Image: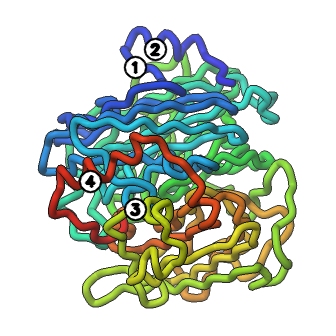
Amino acid sequence: MMILSTASVLSALLLGTNAAIGPVADLQIVNKHISPDGFPRSTVLAGGTFPGPLIEGIKGDRFLLNVEDKLTDKTMLTDTSIHWHGLFQKGSNWADGVSWITQCPITPERSFLYDFEVPSQAGTFWYHSHLSTQYCDGLRGAMVVYDPNDPHRHLYDIDDDSTVITLADWYHYPATQQPAGLPGTFNSTLINGLGRYKNGPLSDLAVINVSHGKRYRFRLVSISCDPNFNFSIDGHRMTIIEVDGVNHRPLTVDSIQIFAGQRYSFVLNANQPVSNYWVRANPGSGNTGFVNATNSAILRYVGALKCDPTTCSTSTQPLVETALHPLVPSRVPGKHVPGGADMNFVFNITVSNTGLFLLNGAPCESPSVPVLLQILSGAHTAQELMPKNDNFFELKPNQVVEVSFIGGSPGAPHPFHLHGHNFYVVRSAGNSTYNWDNPVIRDVVSTGSSVDDLTTFRFVTDNAGPWFLHCHIDWHLEAGLAIVFAENIPRIGKEIPPVSWDRLCPTYHRVHPNSTASLIV
């Protein structure tokens, strides 16, 4: 359950900060000109803000999120769909929000109600467009499911909308102008929606307010399209307690490397002298460094002067993924040897001479009819569903699946996200050994940059549906770096989506009579 601070309530009232919404809400998707780093551009936004409004709920809630497409700017995509990243959607695969996998896109002046329950999950999540590279134009925001019985509750005093920290890459041009596969050259890093770009104006930076003596649960969310970030707060250590919606044993660090789509909750003890401290999110590529306070925000103690910090810091205790262990120990499924699962996949990532990403020599191409609709219409095998797609795999129920990615590929490191599940990371990038003893559980894991690297994870097929496994660098996804798992096809065929879902495809094809899906979106 969120614990509101008086400061955050007053700040929202006085400054007009957008209030959090949910679990029942309308979410209008609109075009709007904004200049979060001092450079104006047209965008695609949820609720007219960047990031979009924080969506909140409590463990056990039913979410009713009505997405209304009000897009008109044809320099960008005007259709849309929304994915609720990290939520399992058990029994509601149709609400997973992936265009051409679980639905047809929502068209302008139409709406679609995402109706799903979150019976067993709590933690930090996020939402974003899952149509092509649209979320790079701004359609992304944070989502929190609070747990009234949080086992870490004794470690912090404050956990509310003021303690959510988003990290984003920002572009001065529409995503549609970026060639597929090539990472877009981002112009700035935005922390909580504000930042500066190289040689740009000294625009406002985000300010995170704390009161001396209080302990804060900060929820760090990478809503990045491309770069990973090294995150730190000068003069302060961070005690990680949650990873991608899973409680973990407290682990104290002074910097966190966070990849696109990943989330961490950490406790910060505001016990330093009352002052201003730099918050840093140094990208792994592009415009790195902190000249003119790029890639920065400000941690400000109540009572400090309103001025830029003068602090500096060097990390001596960075996060190492293998040091993370779930709070409640659980046994890694399958035999505790490499390849000891019921189904084992090893993927090698290469690039074709046309710039497409290939997994074991094949790109992932999307169907002209969503996979879920095909299954509900009677398709039963991979050959029937996606006959030209070698990266489509049928999974039987109650099986242990092991997935490995060979490192050192073009564009690495690649952060891979699995829909419908989280997984045990039994071998992390940069490690030559396997960990079968209570390894980190998460839903986004990065491949390694070295050819000697192998990243391996396991999950159990206990959630029927067509589920996406893809690189969360959106430019790479657009260029085919994805896999589709059709899990328990007979059970999927018994699912009954709402009538409004049935209408999405006929409506889409009336608006786009000559449209055919291209690469996976």
Name the residue nearer the viewer: 510 or 189: 510
Separation of disc 3 and disc 4 at Cα? Answer: 34 Å
The reply to whether the C-beta atoms of the residues labelled 1 and 2 are less than 8 Å apart is yes
Q: Mark 2 = which residue?
A: 11
The reply to whether the C-beta atoms of the residues labelled 3 and 4 are less than 8 Å apart is no
Name the residue nearer the viewer: 45 or 391: 391
Separation of disc 4 and disc 2 at Cα? Answer: 29 Å
Separation of disc 3 and disc 2 at Cα? Answer: 44 Å
For the N terminus, which image quadrant? top right
Is 121 rendered above or below residue 102? above
Question: Which kind of residue does numbered mark 4 sit on?
Answer: Asn
The reply to whether the C-beta atoms of the residues labelled 4 and 2 are less than 8 Å apart is no
- Of badges 4 and 1, the one in the foreground is 1
In x, y percent, where is residue 106?
31, 45
The reply to whether the C-beta atoms of the residues labelled 4 and 1 are less than 8 Å apart is no
Quick check: can you spot residue 278?
no
